[in-house]
Image (spheres, grey):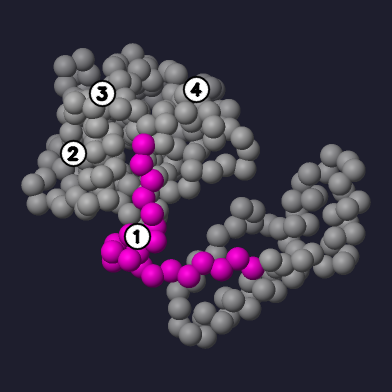
């Protein structure tokens, strides 16, 4: 839409995608949370003007992308398709009409039996040529169950988006051939100074294991009890005490608090 304003760092990111004669180049854009990765992806879809596929991590994110497409573009709602557990509408006039399809890694990477509607839509996705494939949370794609999506979808250009281009394994390096090189990475400090991001303070708190927990952890090192080691470091009482103190401290100040955890026991 003409009234949509693309900020300078978003324009810079897009310029790296279309740097050579305006032709889209595959690669990865790294922008911090809140810097507008979704609008960058949508702007790339609009500039290419061809059939576009968007992959993201959850069904909630699929719906968010759909609402953002309706907010920022003039695309007709019926030309936005979703492939989730609840939405499996086949693409109409798929050979001649451009559209946007939004789905999750798990839906496209699933190797088991599917319903008739889901299988029909998946067949359309695999048979059609896509002008652009936008890969949201691109650090997820190197997973063994998801990487096949990159080879089964026929896309002329692949654009990866993420705020955290890291993984706990070494598979992050596979993104270079699955998607492409890193094209642009914005500095969160610069965006904060420019007023695009809220002022933040990052603090890392190291919490030693209690004696009893550490003894059990060492006993589990020699075997294959990985789940026990994970449970011990996750439920480290010193860490939980520190976390409880911080939550109560911010509650007392009237702050809103979010706690993220890899494991919830």
Residue count near mark 3 (Cα–Cα under 10 Å), binned few <14, some 14–19, many ≥20: some
Of badges 3 and 2, nearer the viewer stands 3
Q: Which residues are magenta?
A: 183-205
For the residue labelled by badge 3, is the local secondary structure a helix, a strand or a loop? loop
Check disc 1 and report its element: helix, strand or loop: helix
Residue 48 appears at what percent x and percent y? Answer: 20, 29
User: Which type of secondary structure does the marked residue at label 2 adopt?
Assistant: helix
Quadrant in which the N terminus is drawn:
top left
Horizontal side of residue 94 vs 33, given as left or right: left
> How far apart are the two marked residues, 4 and 2, measured between alpha carbons?
29 Å
Look at mark 4 in the image and give the residue it sits on. 148
N-terminal label among 1 and 2:
2
Q: Quadrant of residue 78?
A: top left
208 relative to 17 in the view: left or right: right
Q: Are marks 4 and 2 in contact (CB under 8 Å)?
A: no
Task: Say above or below: 125 vs 197.
Answer: above
Mark 2 and mark 1 in contact (Cβ < 8 Å)? no
Q: Nearer the viewer, mark 4 or mark 1?
A: 1
Inspect this view and state whether residue 146 appears: no
Residue at the bottom extreme, as displayed: 252
Name the magenta segment's main secondary structure. Answer: loop
Residue displayed at 16% across by 43% down: 73
Queried whether the magenta region covers residue 194, the answer comes back as yes
Q: Which mark is residue 77?
A: 2
Give the mark toward the camera: 4 or 2: 4
Pointer 1: what residue? 190
Taking depth in this image into account, of 255 and 161 the one nearest to the observer is 161
Q: Which residue corresponds to the image point at 46% horizontal and 25% vertical from the top-left?
A: 178
Residue 52, located in which quarter of the rendered image?
top left
Q: Which mark is residue 131?
A: 3
């Amino acid at each position: 839409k003409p009234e949509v304003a693309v900020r300078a760092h978003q324009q810079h990111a897009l310029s790296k995608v279309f740097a050579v004669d305006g032709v889209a180049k595959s690669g990865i854009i790294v922008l911090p949370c809140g810097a507008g990765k979704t609008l960058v992806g949508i702007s790339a879809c609009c500039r290419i003007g061809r059939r576009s596929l968007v992959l993201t991590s959850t069904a909630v994110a699929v719906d968010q992308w759909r609402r953002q497409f309706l907010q920022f573009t003039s695309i007709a709602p019926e030309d936005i398709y979703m492939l989730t557990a609840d939405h499996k509408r086949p693409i109409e006039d798929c050979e001649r009409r451009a559209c946007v399809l939004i789905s999750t890694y798990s839906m496209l990477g699933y190797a088991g039996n599917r319903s008739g509607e889901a299988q029909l839509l998946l067949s359309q996705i695999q048979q059609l040529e896509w002008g652009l494939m936008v890969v949201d949370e691109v650090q997820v794609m190197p997973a063994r169950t998801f990487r096949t999506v990159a080879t089964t979808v026929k896309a002329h250009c692949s654009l990866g988006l993420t705020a955290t281009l890291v993984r706990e394994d070494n598979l992050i390096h596979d993104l270079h051939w699955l998607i492409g090189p890193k094209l642009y990475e914005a500095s969160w400090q610069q965006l904060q100074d420019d007023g695009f991001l809220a002022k933040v303070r990052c603090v890392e708190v190291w919490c030693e294991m209690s004696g009893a927990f550490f003894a059990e952890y060492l006993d589990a090192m020699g075997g294959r009890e990985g789940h026990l080691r994970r449970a011990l470091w996750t439920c480290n009482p010193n860490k939980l005490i520190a976390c409880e103190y911080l939550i109560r401290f911010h509650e007392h100040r009237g702050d809103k608090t979010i706690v993220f955890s890899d494991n919830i026991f």
